[in-house]
Amino acid sequence: MTYIQKSYQKKFGNKDNSMETNIIEDVAYLVEKANNTPAPAYKVYTALLTQSGTDAPVATVLENTLGNVTFSRDFGPGEYGIIIPEGFNINKTFITGFGNIYQSNITHMSIADGSNVTGYYTFYLYEPDGVIYTYFYDETFTKVDLSYFNQTTIPIEIRVYN
């Protein structure tokens, strides 16, 4: 008798095995279904970005099935590159929360301190070099580092569909 059979027999006190058989069949069905679950339709990178001083942003990674994702600050204040592994297809990439992110008609998200907007940020994809760029601006749209916003955390989710 298995552990599942013993625990249900003890709990329900049944003398015949009908309930045990049904439960075991149900568990077997659920295990089989879990084993046959198709792979996700995309790979994902979800993180919270922060920055100290003028260093590259630091990511607190919540989920990562994309692989080695790195951040660089090679471009100047408020300009960062997010490098994701080879094989990313701009036409199958989605960054949560942004509309058109392909170099034109860029969506700017607000950064607020209470009820006051203190700046903006945006992401855009650039396929030739395989980099996702992010820019941070103060309220006058001057580029500034993320650290300008005093411990602000920026969420990011990148999905690359199969």
Image (spheres, rainbow, N blue to C red):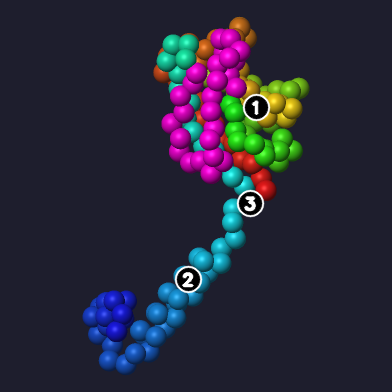
Say what amino acid the circle numbered 2 marks. Answer: Leu
Q: Residue 58's spot in the image, x, y percent?
A: 46, 24
Say what amino acid the circle numbered 3 marks. Answer: Ala
The residue depicted at 58 percent of the width and 14 percent of the height is 74
Residue in the foreground of this view, choosing between 87 and 94: 87
User: For the view shown, which residue lies furthest in the front direction?
Assistant: 86
What secondary structure is found at the residue carrying circle 1?
strand
Q: Which mark is residue 30?
A: 2
The residue depicted at 27 percent of the width and 80 percent of the height is 6
Compare marks 2 and 3 and give the one earlier in the sequence.
2
Q: Which mark is residue 110?
A: none
Q: Residues within 10 Å of mark 2 (few under 14, many from 20)?
A: few
Along the horizontal axis of the image, is 114 left or right of 6? right
The residue depicted at 47 percent of the width and 71 percent of the height is 30
Q: Residue 52's spot in the image, x, y percent?
A: 42, 15
Residue in the foreground of this view, choosing between 103 and 16: 103
Q: Tell me: residue 113, above or below residue 47.
A: above
Q: State which region is magenta.
A: 56-81
Q: Which mark is residue 131?
A: 1
44 is within the stretch colored magenta: no
Along the horizontal axis of the image, is 97 left or right of 118? right
Compare marks 1 and 3 and give the one earlier in the sequence.
3
Residue at which label 3 appears: 41
Q: Nearer the viewer, mark 1 or mark 2?
A: 1
Cα–Cα span, label 2 and label 3: 21 Å
The residue depicted at 60 percent of the width and 60 percent of the height is 38
Say which quarter of the image contains residue 128: top right
Q: Residues within 10 Å of mark 1 (few under 14, many from 20)?
A: some
Along the horizontal axis of the image, is 53 left or right of 39? left
What secondary structure is found at the residue carrying circle 3?
loop
Say what amino acid the circle numbered 1 marks. Answer: Val
